[in-house]
Structures are given as C-alpha cells and as structure tokens.
Amino acid sequence: MYGLFIRVLFVSHLATTFYMLGLIWIMQVVHYPLFASVGNEQFSDYARRHSKRITLVVASPMLIEAATALLLLLFRPSTIAVWFLWTGVALLGCICLSTAMVQVPCHKILSWGFDPAVHHRLVWTNGLRTAAWSLRGALVLWMVWSSLSPLGTAHVME
C-alpha cells in the first residue's frame, strides 16, 4: 500500500508540474504579449476578468504541485536523490515568491488600466518564472528517468 501511495504522489507531482509548465509557456509566449493589443479603453475590464479566470486555472494545480513537492521530501522514493527534491522545492519557492511579490502586484496595477512599463515588467519577470518552471520540468523528468529500471531489465509492477 505504501508503494501505491508513493506512486500516486509522484505521478501527481509529475502531472501538476507539467500542467503548470505548459500553462506558463502559453502565458509567456501567447497570452501576456497580447495584453498590449487589447486597447486602452477595454483593458481595465479585460485585466480584471483575466485575473479572476486565471486564478481558477492556476490556484489548485499550484497548491497541489507545492504540496506534492513537500510530501515527496517526507516520503522520498529511494531512487530519487534528496538534492533533486530540495532543488525542486527551492525553485518552487522562487516561483511562489515571484508570483506574490511581482506578478500579482503587476496584475493589480494593470487592472486600473494598461501601463506599458508594468506590462513590460510582467512579461520580463514572468520569463524568469518560465525558466524556473522549465528547470523544474527537467528536474522532474530526471527524477522519472532515475526511477525507471535500467534498460534491458524487466520490471514487474506491484
């Protein structure tokens, strides 16, 4: 039963990390750059609606990703080096701090109206979050890789 718990925990972590990785890349490459195209008259309403709707898409997966990262520290699979997990938690810490200290305030300012300097700050700093999530994605893939049986040997599922 413990093995099943660890598998569910690990797969949940993998799924939420890659969900967030895909989402952050869409935000960085498509959505945030298009903010500049909305138009000043409609922007304030657009920005408020964006913040409300994106919270529905982001909040739960971010919390699940953080919770599973911390739980993996407590219930570490023997195939995963502890430094992988701590590095992942550190990256999540940077992402969460950036979200709370930079992106959320930028969104609040933009909800009052389009500001090119704030928009630029949002896109640029979100690029740093995108890089951090990309590193997390690579790290989680490496964890999966290190958990797989060596090539050429059979592994029987429990």
Image: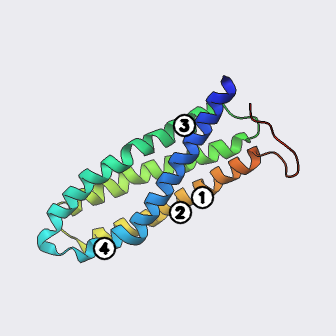
The kind of residue on which mark 4 rests is Leu
Residue 131's mark? Answer: 2
Q: Is residue 129 visible?
A: no
Q: Which residue is mark 3?
A: 68
Mark 3–mark 2 CB contact (< 8 Å): no
The numbered mark at residue 135 is 1
Q: Which residue is mark 4?
A: 34
**Residue 82 image position (x, y, % from top left):** 70, 39
Residue 57 in picture, x, y percent from top left = 35, 50
Residue closest to the eye, 134 or 156: 156
Q: Earlier in the sequence, mark 4 or mark 2?
A: 4
Secondary structure of residue under mark 2: helix
Label 1 crowd bin: few (<14), some (14–19), many (20+), radius 10 Å = some
Marks 1 and 3, how far apart at CA: 17 Å
Q: Secondary structure at mark 1?
A: helix
Residue 27 lies, with reference to residue 34, above or below; the image says: above
